[in-house]
Image (cartoon, grey):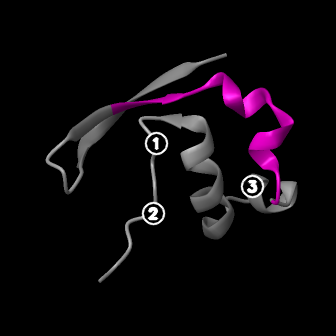
């Protein structure tokens, strides 16, 4: 089920790494990926739910950028 998604604009990390594609991993099939989340929030693309879910199911891990 892994799916590679090419990005039209690369994501630049503070470490200098550029991400040009993201893989949605098979972890999405596991119940633990949704632990602590409401399925309705994920289905309606609630930002807070996606910020929690994306690091669990993407490679490289997409995380929330914290402001200083």
Check disc 1 and report the residue beneath it: 61
The N terminus - image quarter: top right
> Where does residue 19 sit, x and y in percent of width and height?
28, 37
Callout 3: SS: helix
Check disc 3 and report the residue beneath it: 42
Farthest residue to the left: give it: 16
Magenta span contains residue 27? yes
The C terminus - image quarter: bottom left
Image quarter of residue 48: bottom right
Residue at image position (75%, 55%) is: 42
Mark 3 or mark 1: whose residue is earlier in sequence = 3
Farthest residue to the top: give it: 1
> Which range of residues does the magenta coloring cover?
21-36
Against 55, residue 14 (above or below) is below
Q: Is residue 65 left or right of residue 23?
A: left
> Where does residue 12 sit, x and y in percent of width and height?
21, 49
Mark 2 or mark 3: whose residue is earlier in sequence = 3
Residue at image position (61%, 43%) is: 56
Check disc 2 and report the residue beneath it: 64
| Numbered disc in front, either 2 or 3 | 2
> Where does residue 22 sit, x and y in percent of width and height?
42, 32
Q: How many marks?
A: 3
Residue count near mark 1 (Cα–Cα under 10 Å), binned few <14, some 14–19, many ≥20: few
**For the residues marked 3 and 1, what is the alpha-carbon distance in whole angstroms?**
18 Å
Q: Is residue 62 left or right of residue 50?
A: left
Circles 2 and 3: CB atoms closer than 8 Å: no
């Amino acid at each position: 089920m892994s799916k590679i998604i090419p990005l039209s604009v690369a994501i630049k990390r503070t470490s200098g790494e550029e991400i040009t594609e993201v893989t949605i991993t098979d972890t999405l099939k596991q119940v633990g990926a949704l632990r602590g989340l409401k399925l309705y929030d994920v289905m309606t693309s609630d930002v807070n739910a996606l910020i929690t879910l994306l690091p669990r199911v993407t490679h490289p891990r997409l995380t929330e950028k914290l402001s200083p």
